[in-house]
Amino acid sequence: MTSSYTPAPTPLQAVLFDMDGTLVDTEQLWWDTVAEAAERLGHVLVEADQPDVLGRPVEHTAGVLAARSGAPAAAIAAELHRAFADRVRTRVVLRPGALALLGALRDEGVPTALVTASPREVAETVVAALAEAGHGGFTVTVTADDTALTKPNPDPYLAACRALRVPPAACVAVEDTPTGVASAEAAGCQVLAVPSVARIDPAPGRTVLDSLEQATPDGLRALVADAPAPRFLVPGLTTRRARAGRPFTARVAGLLRGAARPVTFAAAEGPAWLTVHADGTLSGTPTPTPPPGPDGAEVAVAEVAEVAEVTAVDAHGATARLTVRIPVAAADAPPLDRVRVMSWNLWLGGSPVDGHRDKQLAVLLAADIDVVGLQETAVHAAPELAEALGWFHHSAGENLAVLSRHPVVDTLGDPAVGFYGAAGARIRLDEHPDGTPHELVLWTAHLNYTPYGPYDACFGGLPAAELADREGESGRVREIDGILAAMAPDLAAADRTPVLLVGDFNAPSHLDWTAAAAPLHGGHGPVDWPVSRAVERAGLRDSYREAHPDPVAAPGTTWSPVHPRHEDGSGRPEPQDRIDFVLHAGDRLDVLDSTALATGRIAPWPDVAANDWPSDHAAVVTTFRFARRG
């Protein structure tokens, strides 16, 4: 006989309101304020800037403008504060239905809180305007001045729940931006989204309405009562390698979705040495027992797979389960002998695709990646992915990052690199039995995109010699020379510590544009593309072409899975090319396999929002084996 337990519905205990764009029509005022400041600094805001403007604290947006302009962030923040406050004082407009919903909640005795990323000075101006319109006030007000971290972090909503003495699972947060939604969901609240400027789609635990006029206290109660069951993004995962006798840690909490906070993690089963802590951290010192042989005697093995079943129980008593596989090497086992390396342009952080962060996580876990060089991270992608995966990362500037299942032990290059350039990291994959490190160095690069060689060839009809000259005009040759100069010390030691250079070069390879492959490139070939020649001269080898020497049989196209036609509306076919690379130097790595990866549903531009693949580039994934040299 089996039994099951269905938790009783949780009653609604509070409603937590965002301010700008949710209760009052200030989101456009804020956008106009930032747009005006950005224009003075030489930058024109576009739709892709929304994640860094809407729902963000002033300091974040000021930091983004400072990175792009070189102006001091503090001065930009002060000017944004002043200009926005001036606009708010003269133009506060209530959102339709806001006052009626606040009044209905007050009449039914439901506590309310104001939770805003705006400073207290602005919040008080808005609260005064609401009072003049007949609102009796909030039980609690949380502003950007009240928590060390603000949206999209959960801190503001958690602070409001603490002040109200209610669990987040029993609250509904009302928001209008993806940033605010992320904050509320991370805190464990149910979410009612009423988009003002940026699009928001429904999701488990999230309801989307066109207007607050459609919202009622009974409807908000239903959101809490019908809270979704928690789930992990994947049914199982493999951690980085552990070694017997040495401490091991991993984290799984970032992969849980739909749970009502607080959540408690525990081990349903697993090895005796492993502890699953309530916050989702796994830790312990492995002491694997060799498996018995046919005669019952223990058989020495270099590595065993330990399996733990982790459960997560949320505030409603609902449970999710995750299978965690931990490879455990014997104390005297050789170091890790294989590594999977990816290069991935995330396409403005993934923002053109709905639910892009979870889709990025799903790609990384399904591909079983060890180390990835990222481009177009939009500042936040790498730390958010690392936090969710329990991995390590190094971010440089607003665009580049290294993400790794294994510890990052040193960072390389300019940490404030511009949008184009390169950044690197030294990664410790494992240790030798004597304790000496087993490492590799990975650099990730992004080169300027215009003028673009395949357009010059296929649309402009330029001959090979002029194509090379145009590459010089693009700045890519200068950029790659600078990157290779920065990598020179690593390349000199590549036979001892393998070196990889991955990235979006925005330039083809001479290995692809051969005479035989000319039909794939508008009849052009051979072309001696200078960027690929430069890395070749520096001793870097192209892993994809090592695995697939024939460019006709295996073009390896990475640009672009979402652009079969040129986006200018002419109907011309978009030149399909390989402009993303995983390159390696030194004699320690052998290529086992390499692929251009783009999976799931991929609709063409502009209908990309629902795509499973959250990028406009295919990724490149190469599996390397560490060779034992005599």
Image (cartoon, rainbow, N blue to C red):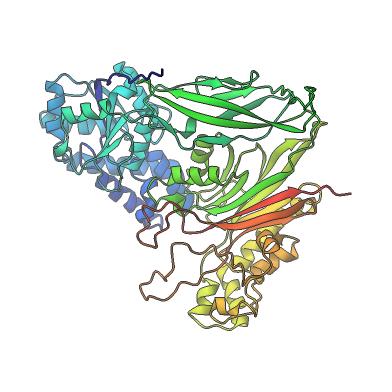
Front in this rendered view, residue 531 or 604: 604
Q: Nearer the viewer, residue 206 or 44?
A: 206
Tell me how many marks there are: 0
Q: Residue at x 35, y 51 (%)?
A: 37
- Is residue 21 visible in the rendered structure shown here? yes
Which residue appears farthest toward the top when viewing the image?
165
**Quarter of the rendering occupied by the N terminus:** top left
- Give residue 185's position: percent from left, percent from top: 36, 33
Closest to the observer, 406 or 37: 406
Name which residue lies at 48% across and 34% down. Answer: 255
- Residue 384 in percent (x, y) is at 49, 39
Q: Quadrant of residue 191?
A: top left
Q: Position of residue 522 (x, y in %)?
A: 53, 80
Among the 4 quarters of the image, the one containing residue 596 = bottom right
Res 545 → quadrant: bottom right
In the displayed structure, 248 sits above or below 85; it is: above
Whether residue 367 sits left or right of residue 546 in the image: it is left
Above or below 615: residue 508? below
Left or right side of 142 for 506 = right
180 sits to left or right of 372: left
Q: Classify 502 as above or below 470.
A: above
